[in-house]
């Protein structure tokens, strides 16, 4: 379906910008990221589904911003937040946080990028399975399965390393 | 009560929830002042955003128009993309060889005033240096010297993309000692370069900003940008409006 990019921008860019800002915590980086998301939209516009564009753009923004953080080695905070929530216990010191961030690299190494996005939505954004399903486009059971597998991985890694 | 995630409120404002979820949310919002305040903040933020960052001020319209131009004008494809391109790509190797600078042979008589930003390319020609302009031809083993002019306190990164989709960093103000400009404000990067056998073109970019430039981020964008040679030859480099850019395209000939 061919889309009007300007119309999409006016309707969805504020949401994309807020999402980028919430992850990157930097106005300039967020602005660049928001533009990147729309550039990707321009590239993909002939292949877009029109049902819930906000879901797609929100996921694209999340994915892009996590990649930006990863490239800048600043993923520690958000990683730790995921890890702590998967484990169910908050970590207190930086050294432990860094270990957790490294653990996350191991956990997500062979996972699809969308699994990381789902983990952020569920563990950081505190979305329900249904809400993650609505935004990610996966079925509720698919989301549940991915998160269950992730939890299993974390348990295995904890037993091996911690 | 659990905090309603931002995306759910965003989709409520956009009307992109299922009808059942919309009803559920409406009921929650009607009974919860904090949710109503969050909705108001989203609506206010929407207005502020579009005033501050209107579509016309982003680089997206230029990307769209470049895409349209690309569809209607395939001259670069005709010029550069030949059936044997894949073989050529596989056969080509190195990008540049660093060689000694040749500042002394460059004529510095061109004086540039004001806050202009300029990227200059020179080719060593015996004991002289010829300035290369956008679209000029060069060949394998030509020795090039890059120079630039930017206002004081401005940051810059200079890199090039070649016909093999390789990206080469030539200079970064974040990694190099900032040098004094000459009387005309022109600064030469510390090393000259010898062109390798990459085909079709070499396009040099200078990206500048008042803010710190993250080299890795720019180079990562460049690598992505370089994958599409039509874009790499003809389009602006995709960076935000807080950056400025200059480029010089060199056409490679045998």
Image (tube, coloured by chain):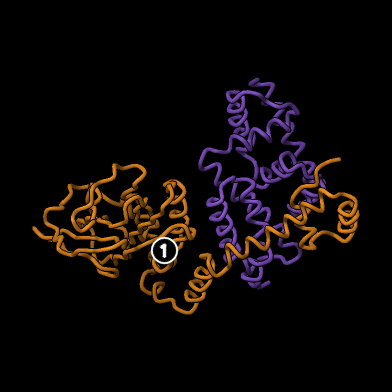
Chain colours: A purple, B orange
Q: What residue do we see at 76% from left, 28% from top? A: A88
What residue do we see at 86% from left, 58% from top? B22
Residue at the image position 64 percent from the left and 73 percent from the top: A4
| Spot occupied by residue A150 in the image (x, y as percentages of width and height) | 72, 36
Residue B240, x across and y down, in percent: 49, 58
The local crowd at label 1, few if under 14, some if 14 to 19, many if 20 or more residues have their Cα within 10 Å, is: many
Q: Please state if A20 lies on the left or on the right of B61 as rendered.
A: right
Chain for disc number 1: B
Provide residue B201's location: percent of width, then percent of height: 32, 64
Name the residue beneath numbered marker 1.
Answer: B232
**Which of the 4 image quarters holds residue B236?**
bottom left
Quadrant showing the C terminus of chain B: bottom left
Q: Is residue B195 above or below residue A68?
A: below
The quarter of the rendered structure image containing the N terminus of chain B is: top right
Judging depth in this view, the residue of B128 and B181 nearest the camera is: B181
Residue under the point 37% across and 57% down = B161
Measuring from the top left, give residue B8's x and y in whole percent.
78, 53
Q: Is residue A125 left or right of residue B148?
A: right
How many discs appear?
A: 1
When the figure is inspected, residue B29 is found, relative to residue B15, above or below; the finding is above
Q: In the image shown, does A142 or B240 lie closer to the viewer?
A: B240
Q: Relative to residue B86, is residue B170 depicted above or below? A: above
* Furthest residue in direction left, as rendered: B127
Q: Quadrant of residue B90?
A: bottom left
Give whichever of B113, B172 is nearer the camera.
B113
Residue B88, visible in the rendered structure = no
Task: Name, please, the residue furthest toward the bottom.
Answer: B72
Q: Secondary structure at mark 1?
A: helix
């Amino acid at each position: 379906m061919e889309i009007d990019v300007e119309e999409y921008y006016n309707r969805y860019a504020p949401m994309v910008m807020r999402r980028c800002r919430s992850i990157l915590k930097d106005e300039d980086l967020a602005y660049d990221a928001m533009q990147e998301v729309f550039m990707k939209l321009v590239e993909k516009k002939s292949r877009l589904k029109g049902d819930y564009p906000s879901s797609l753009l929100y996921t694209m923004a999340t994915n892009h911003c996590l990649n930006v953080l990863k490239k800048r080695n600043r993923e520690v905070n958000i990683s730790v937040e995921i890890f702590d929530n998967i484990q169910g216990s908050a970590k207190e010191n930086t050294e432990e946080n860094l270990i957790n961030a490294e653990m996350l690299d191991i956990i997500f190494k062979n996972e699809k990028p969308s699994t990381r996005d789902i983990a952020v939505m569920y563990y950081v954004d505190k979305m329900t399975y249904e809400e993650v399903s609505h935004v990610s486009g996966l079925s509720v059971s698919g989301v549940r399965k991915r998160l269950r597998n992730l939890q299993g991985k974390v348990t295995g890694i904890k037993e091996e390393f911690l | 009560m659990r905090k309603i995630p931002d995306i759910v409120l965003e989709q409520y404002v956009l009307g992109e929830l299922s009808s059942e979820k919309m009803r559920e949310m409406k009921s929650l919002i009607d009974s919860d002042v904090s949710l109503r305040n969050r909705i108001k903040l989203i609506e206010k933020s929407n207005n502020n955003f579009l005033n501050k960052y209107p579509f016309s001020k982003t680089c997206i319209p230029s990307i769209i128009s470049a895409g349209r131009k690309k569809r209607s004008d395939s001259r670069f494809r005709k010029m550069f993309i030949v059936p044997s391109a894949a073989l050529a790509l596989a056969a080509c190797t190195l990008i540049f060889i660093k060689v000694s600078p040749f500042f002394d042979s460059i004529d510095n008589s061109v004086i540039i005033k004001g806050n202009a930003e300029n990227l200059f390319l020179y080719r060593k020609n015996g004991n002289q240096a010829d300035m290369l302009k956008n679209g000029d031809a060069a060949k394998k083993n030509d020795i090039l010297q890059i120079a630039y002019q930017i206002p004081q306190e401005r940051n810059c990164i200079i890199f090039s993309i070649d016909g093999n989709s390789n990206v080469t960093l030539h200079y970064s103000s974040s990694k190099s000692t900032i040098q004094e400009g000459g009387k005309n404000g022109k600064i030469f990067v510390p090393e000259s370069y010898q062109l390798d056998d990459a085909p079709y073109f070499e396009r040099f970019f200078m990206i500048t900003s008042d803010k710190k430039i993250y080299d890795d981020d720019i180079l990562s964008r460049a690598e992505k940008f370089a994958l599409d040679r039509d874009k790499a030859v003809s389009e602006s480099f995709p960076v935000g409006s807080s950056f400025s850019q200059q480029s010089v395209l060199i056409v490679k000939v045998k």
